[in-house]
Image (spheres, rainbow, N blue to C red):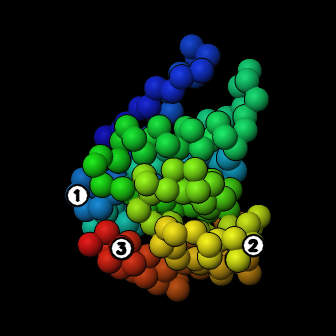
């Protein structure tokens, strides 16, 4: 199943953001890829979580005729949350750029985000992240194992079990 979000201010060729959906029950979780031009690589994470969570994977916009800004990405993500997540405030799970986007979105729209999971969130310092009123979990092993290999390490480290349990407890 896929959700497509129409956003204002786009060109006719790119008037929507496609959102992949995994799982049909459980609390909503929005997975945010890095890049932002690396759409799709969070699919293994989505599949691992889909047995107990409703996972949304938005494929973030790429550069078009208009400039891409953090504000544009935050507005896009908020549109996805409003259109696809349902009445429950979703957890945002982001990797690298996706983690920074999740944090920026939670700061701009704190009433729409239930929790944050930040994987390899590079730019914002720990003190800034700790000031957020939104509950959050961080996975920092990424910093020691490279950009994409963190997925393999996460599986070996039982990261998905920890993540699934934490997200389920946060939504209860």
* Camera-side mark, 1 or 2: 2
Determine the secondary structure under disc 3: helix
* Alpha-carbon span between mark 3 and mark 1: 16 Å
Q: Dividing the picture into quarters, in which one does residue 119 lie?
A: bottom right
Q: Which mark is residue 125?
A: 2
**Which residue: 64% across, 36% down?**
72
Q: Judge by depth and name the residue closer to the eye, 51 or 74.
A: 74
* Camera-side mark, 3 or 1: 3
Q: Is residue 56 visible?
A: yes
Q: Earlier in the sequence, mark 3 or mark 1?
A: 1
**Which residue: 62% across, 41% down?**
73
Q: Which residue is mark 1?
A: 25
Q: Judge by depth and name the residue closer to the eye, 88 or 61.
A: 88
Callouts 1 and 2 close, C-beta under 8 Å: no
| Mark 3 crowdedness (10 Å alpha carbons): few <14, some 14-19, many ≥20 | some
Q: Which residue is mark 3?
A: 170
Determine the secondary structure under disc 1: loop
x then y, percent, for residue 118:
58, 69
Q: Is residue 98 visible?
A: no
x then y, percent, for residue 111:
43, 54
Q: Earlier in the sequence, mark 3 or mark 2?
A: 2
Q: Earlier in the sequence, mark 1 or mark 2?
A: 1
């Amino acid at each position: 199943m896929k959700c497509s979000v129409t956003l204002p201010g786009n060109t006719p060729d790119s008037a929507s953001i496609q959102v992949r959906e995994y799982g049909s029950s459980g609390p909503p979780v929005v997975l945010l890829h890095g890049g932002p031009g690396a759409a799709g690589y969070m699919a293994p994470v989505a599949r691992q979580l889909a047995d107990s969570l409703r996972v949304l994977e938005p494929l973030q916009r790429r550069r078009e005729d208009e400039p891409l800004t953090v504000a544009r990405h935050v507005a896009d993500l908020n549109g996805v949350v409003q259109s696809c997540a349902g009445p429950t405030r979703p957890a945002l799970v982001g990797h690298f750029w996706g983690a920074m986007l999740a944090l920026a979105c939670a700061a701009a729209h704190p009433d729409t985000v239930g929790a944050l999971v930040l994987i390899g969130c590079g730019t914002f310092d720990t003190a800034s992240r700790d000031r957020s009123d939104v509950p959050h979990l961080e996975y920092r092993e990424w910093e020691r194992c490279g950009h994409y290999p963190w997925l393999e390490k996460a599986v070996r480290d039982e990261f998905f079990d920890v993540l699934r349990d934490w997200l389920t407890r946060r939504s209860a």
